[in-house]
């Protein structure tokens, strides 16, 4: 199944990749109840106060004066409006945190109402760079839409115009845009389009066919959200090797290791890493390609253990791991907080020093890799805008230690860290909108010249249209060719 599409269970996508707001956001369109300005101001002030008490990202990338001015401007512009419009206002508000782990949900009964209306574009899509192609059709069989058709416009609006409107609704780490392209794929594009442009009965698409260059206009009836199920899919699904845990020996000196996530609860990471690096050692591999272009993160410790197989030196990963006093005081008796030796030090809570290093595997009880299995050859890391959270932290470890060459596109998570980990859920008193506020600031031990961006590729590459159609991993193939040419 193509990434970002889950016909059998929507929550899998959004919880796994920390973007549940994309699903929830559009399930509010038919709810037209008006909220008075006074009620909105009460909710808005409540949210801003909670962000200041709990979220350390609010003033991380922009000055306090600039952020507070933006907050005051948003507050002053509030007027009587629907819950949906107020929700969109709050999306811009939490965007000021510049943190992709922050999310916002509407009440379930609001979500259900819109889900039953026929107002959604029945397609799953895939961004190839900044170009959009059709991945799946959940609508009628004979509408003239083919797998891989490039979408030029929707209802007369170019893809650039559409992304300019939907991207501001997607909080990212710092000023990243590659993650916005990644998170707008799959059925998310339909959801976000519905949120921004409202209800419509049909969609007029301007398309370009793969292989022929032929352009065509197709009109597609809108569908209910419940149509996004595998049994209603009309096109074959795409699948790529970077979506699986896998090892591939490419030739006598080159191997490929795919790590698509760090959060599979039933996956034995310790055994898997050990088995793969035993193979790498026995095969005398001198060029190792590690694919994390699909890796959206997961459980802390899994990325550190992988890095430990690339470098037997204990390096300082974090300068600090901190939390504001309010969430610390609420949770300081939690056994996990005690295990990590959290302590309040003046105006900030800090995690124990032993948790700041590359050999910290959380409470997973991993053993440090045997020295003979620590790989010493050349490393190439495949990255993308989907590389986020723990995936981004692994990229940061490799970058800060100059342990590898990066191929692909800017990492979706910030090089200097993120605000994630534990989270507080805040329900606004009048609208009942719920905001997930991450509370732990993981500050990577680096000082980039330009903050607010992910690890940059040494060689930029994207999934090509041809490779997308044939299920090939463009970044892997590009890297193999690079090695063969003597990189």
Image (cartoon, helix red, strand yellow):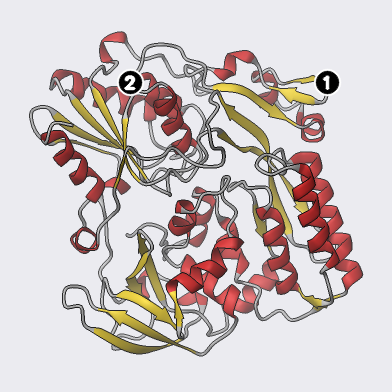
Q: Position of residue 122 (x, y in %)?
A: 42, 78
How far apart are labels 1 and 2 at the CA level?
38 Å
Quarter of the figure that contains the C terminus:
top left
The image's mark for residue 452 is none
Outermost residue toward the left in this view = 252
Q: At x 68% / y 47%, what residue is drawn? A: 97
Q: At x 72% / y 73%, what residue is drawn? A: 85
Judge whether 43 appears above or below 304 on screen: below
- Side (left or right) of 9 relative to 433: left
Q: Position of residue 3 (x, y in %)?
A: 37, 57
- What is the crowding at mark 1: few (fewer than 14 residues within 10 Å), some, or many (at least 20)? few
Quarter of the image holding residue 350?
top right
Residue 104 visible in the displayed image:
yes
Earlier along the polypeptide chain: callout 1 or callout 2? 2
Judge whether 260 appears above or below 232 on screen: above
The one of 131 and 48 positioned closer to us in this rendering: 131
The one of 171 and 35 positioned closer to us in this rendering: 171
Residue 233 visible in the displayed image:
no
Judge whether 355 appears above or below 477 on screen: above
Q: At x 21% / y 82%, what residue is drawn? A: 214
Q: At x 60% / y 62%, what residue is drawn? A: 169
- The total number of labels drawn is 2
What residue is disc 1 on? 346
């Amino acid at each position: 199944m193509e990434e970002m599409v889950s016909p059998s269970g929507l929550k899998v996508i959004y919880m796994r990749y920390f973007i549940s707001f994309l699903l929830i956001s559009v399930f509010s369109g038919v709810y037209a109840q008006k909220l008075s300005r006074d009620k909105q101001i009460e909710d808005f002030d409540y949210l801003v106060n909670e962000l200041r008490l709990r979220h350390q990202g609010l003033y991380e990338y922009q000055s306090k004066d600039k952020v507070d001015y933006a907050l005051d401007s948003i507050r002053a512009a509030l007027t009587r409006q629907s819950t949906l419009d107020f929700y969109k206002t709050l999306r811009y508000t939490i965007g000021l945190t510049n943190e992709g782990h922050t999310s916002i949900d509407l009440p379930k009964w609001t979500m259900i109402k819109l889900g039953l209306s026929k107002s959604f574009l029945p397609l799953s899509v895939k961004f190839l760079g900044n170009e959009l192609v059709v991945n799946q059709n959940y609508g009628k069989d004979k509408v003239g839409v083919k797998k891989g058709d490039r979408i030029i416009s929707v209802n007369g609006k170019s893809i650039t115009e559409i992304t300019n409107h939907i991207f501001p609704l997607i909080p990212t780490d710092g000023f990243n845009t590659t993650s916005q392209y990644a998170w707008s794929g799959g059925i998310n594009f339909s959801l976000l389009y519905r949120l921004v442009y409202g209800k419509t009965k049909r969609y007029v698409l301007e398309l370009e066919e793969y292989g022929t260059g032929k352009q065509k206009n197709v009109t597609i009836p809108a569908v209910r959200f419940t149509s996004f199920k595998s049994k209603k899919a009309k096109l074959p699904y795409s699948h790529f090797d970077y979506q699986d845990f896998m090892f591939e020996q490419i030739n006598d000196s080159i191997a490929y290791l795919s790590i698509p996530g760090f959060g599979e609860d039933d996956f034995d990471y310790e055994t898997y890493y050990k088995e793969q690096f035993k193979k790498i050692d026995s095969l005398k591999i001198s060029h190792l390609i590690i694919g994390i272009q699909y890796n959206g993160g997961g459980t802390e410790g899994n990325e550190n253990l992988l890095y430990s197989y690339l470098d037997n030196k204990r390096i300082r990963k974090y300068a600090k791991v901190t939390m504001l006093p309010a969430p610390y005081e609420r949770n300081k008796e939690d056994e996990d907080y005690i295990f990590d030796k959290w302590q309040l030090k003046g105006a900030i809570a800090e995690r124990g020093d032993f948790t700041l290093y590359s050999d910290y595997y959380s409470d997973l009880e991993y053993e440090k890799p045997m020295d003979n299995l620590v790989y010493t050859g050349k490393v190439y890391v495949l990255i993308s805008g989907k590389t986020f959270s723990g995936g981004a932290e692994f990229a940061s470890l490799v970058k800060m230690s100059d342990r590898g060459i990066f191929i692909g596109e800017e990492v979706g998570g910030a090089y200097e860290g993120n605000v994630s980990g534990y989270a507080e859920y805040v329900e606004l008193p009048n609208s009942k909108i719920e905001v997930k506020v991450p509370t732990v600031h993981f500050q990577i031990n680096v000082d980039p010249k330009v903050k607010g961006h992910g690890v940059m590729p040494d060689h930029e590459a994207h999934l090509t249209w041809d490779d997308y159609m044939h299920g090939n991993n463009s970044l892997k193939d590009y890297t193999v060719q690079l090695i063969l040419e003597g990189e």
